[in-house]
């Protein structure tokens, strides 16, 4: 059993004022594996005060000093790779395909921030003005459970690179990952108060941070619903926000696509991170003229996906993170059937051979139209929809007919044509015949998928305000 009893404020592990204990589960067994003592609003206030006290000195550090600090953080987080790997499997059920990335990404994202900082111009000239990028102040960083360690490191590295200090409120469901990252960051020996980590509930610590007049910036990754609440709270003090929210991303398979190349990419895009990914391509748009052919190939591919024990190397889809998430996925599969969609693979219940854990059957529906709930709502599980279209114009219209706009994938034989389609998709990132990630490019969403961008120079600028000086 894991017992996490402390939070991290002003450079020290301290016992929180909050006394509530929150159970941690292994989703592959549905058993309690530990408890975390949660911070409360008082701890949130203390963490903000510590970050505020540390801001004047940190904001005056040179680029070289920040790079040196980030390098120590990167080395310290990389040294905990194996512990992180075990934690993401144990508390999150990440299968091998995902866990390897989740364990290495936290150190990688710090390295990417170092690269961006090295190239960052803090002063530029605009006409007669000298434009100085100035750090905003205390940043509140709020992360979700689906890649907790990576989001803590990515947001913190960008905030510190900009000269901000930080209060981090990680998801209460990822306390093992948070503990490992906190220990690593402590070992990196930054000045006290520069970063503070207070695991607690969203409606206590999260609200304290997003309403606080001494917090100048919120960088949040999580659901669109919580993002709206944060935006409302932030309005009170004009707190700057970056919001990375949900998605219902389309995969457009064009009529000249090579079926052998398209199907594995479409299935991988849809089921990544066991379907619990903001960028998951859960709406698969196929040409009416080749519908039967694509349905058959997609059905075979989804039915062949192994869902089960995350420690088994064959597993592609691990358990859902919580019982609530399992129920949600079951509910949407039932809803899809009730709406008249036709099941091509999967369905309700657990996959064969699994028992207690929150395992689900990778599910594929066809005869879906874009107004059905399974085509509109972010399910956050391995439930994919096939939607037929008549021509490219209709495919683009369906792809854009969504509240979201985080990511999209276009698959086609003629890459020039596929790129022209990509240009017409309203999403922060459109991939053409690839699933490769580019950490130098801005990442973020259109519409209800968010506000602002992370990564690269965009990620650092998000923690700064331009100031024009004319003399
Ligand atoms: P969530 O919104 O429930 O919680 C995210 C974080 O916000 C948690 O730390 C939570 O405690 C906190 N929170 C909850 N209520 C709050 C409030 N009122 N004020 C302040 N903080 C509050 O999201 P989740 O279930 O943890 O994560 C899944 C969601 O995250 C999905 O919608 C997914 O698409 C999204 N997500 C987006 C991205 C992206 O980059 N766009 C990446 C990963 C996940």
Image (cartoon, rainbow, N blue to C red):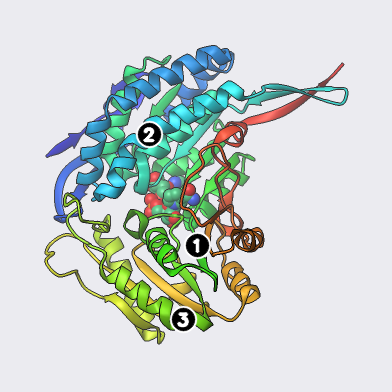
Earlier in the chain: of badge 3 and badge 2, it is 2
Task: Place residue 189 in its image quadrant.
Answer: top left
The quadrant of the picture occupied by the N terminus is top left
Label 1 vs 2, first from the N-terminus: 2
Which mark, residue 249? Answer: 1
Label 3: element kind: helix
Residue 203 seen in the figure:
no
Which residue is rendered at x = 55% and y = 45% of the image?
443
Residue 404, horizontal then vertical, whole percent: 55, 61
Q: Is 456 on the left-hand or right-hand side of 99?
A: right
Look at the picture and state if 114 lies above or below 405.
Answer: above
User: Residue at point 24% right, 66% down?
Assistant: 360
The x, y position of residue 432, in whole percent, is 54, 56
Image quarter (top left, top right, bottom left or bottom right) of the C terminus: top right
Helix, strand or loop status at disc 1: loop
Label ID, residue 72: none
Spatial distance from mark 3 to mark 1, Cα to Cα?
20 Å
Query: What residue is disc 2 on?
Result: 106
Q: In this figure, which residue is indicated by the disc labeled 3?
A: 291
Task: Single out the mark in the foreground, 3 or 2.
Answer: 3
> Can residue 394 be seen in the rendering of this structure?
yes
């Amino acid at each position: 059993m894991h017992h996490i009893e402390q939070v991290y404020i002003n450079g020290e592990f301290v016992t929180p004022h909050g006394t509530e204990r929150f159970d941690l589960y292994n989703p592959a067994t549905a058993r309690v594996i530990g408890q975390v003592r949660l911070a409360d609003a008082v701890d949130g206030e203390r963490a903000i005060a510590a970050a505020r006290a540390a801001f004047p000195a940190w904001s005056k550090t040179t680029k070289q000093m920040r790079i040196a600090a980030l390098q120590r953080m990167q080395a310290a987080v990389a040294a905990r790779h194996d512990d992180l790997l075990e934690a993401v499997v144990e508390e999150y059920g990440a299968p091998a395909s995902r866990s390897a990335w989740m364990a290495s990404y936290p150190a990688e994202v710090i390295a990417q921030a170092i690269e961006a900082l090295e190239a960052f111009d803090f002063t530029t000239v605009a006409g007669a003005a000298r434009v100085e990028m100035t750090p905003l102040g205390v940043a509140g960083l709020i992360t979700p459970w689906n890649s907790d360690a990576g989001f803590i490191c990515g947001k913190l590295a960008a905030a510190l690179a900009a000269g901000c200090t930080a209060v981090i409120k990680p998801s209460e469901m990822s306390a093992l990952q948070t503990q490992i990252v906190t220990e690593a960051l402590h070992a990196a020996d930054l000045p006290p108060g520069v970063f503070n980590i207070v695991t607690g509930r969203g409606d206590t610590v999260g609200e304290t941070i997003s309403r606080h007049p001494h917090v100048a910036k919120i960088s949040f990754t999580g659901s669109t619903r919580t993002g709206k609440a944060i935006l409302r709270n932030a309005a009170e003090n004009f707190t700057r926000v970056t919001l990375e929210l949900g998605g219902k991303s389309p995969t457009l398979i064009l009529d000249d696509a090579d079926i052998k190349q398209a199907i594995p990419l479409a299935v991988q895009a849809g089921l990544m991170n066991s379907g619990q990914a903001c960028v998951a391509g859960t709406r698969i748009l196929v040409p009416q003229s080749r519908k039967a052919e694509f349905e058959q190939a997609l059905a075979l591919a989804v039915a062949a996906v192994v869902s089960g024990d995350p420690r088994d190397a064959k597993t592609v889809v691990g358990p859902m993170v919580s019982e609530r998430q399992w129920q949600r996925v079951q509910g949407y599969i039932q809803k899809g059937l009730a709406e008249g969609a036709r099941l091509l693979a999967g369905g309700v219940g657990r996959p064969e051979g699994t028992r207690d854990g929150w395992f689900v059957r990778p599910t594929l529906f066809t005869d879906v139209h874009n107004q059905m709930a399974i085509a509109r709502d972010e399910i956050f599980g391995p439930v994919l929809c096939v939607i037929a279209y008549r021509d490219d114009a209709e495919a683009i219209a369906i792809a854009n007919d969504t509240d979201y706009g985080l990511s999209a994938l276009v698959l086609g034989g003629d890459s020039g044509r596929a790129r022209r389609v990509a240009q017409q998709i309203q999403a922060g990132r459109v991939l053409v015949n690839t699933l490769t990630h580019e950490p130098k490019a801005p990442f973020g969403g259109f519409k209800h998928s968010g506000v602002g961008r992370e990564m690269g120079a965009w990620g650092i600028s998000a923690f700064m305000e331009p100031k024009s000086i004319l003399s």
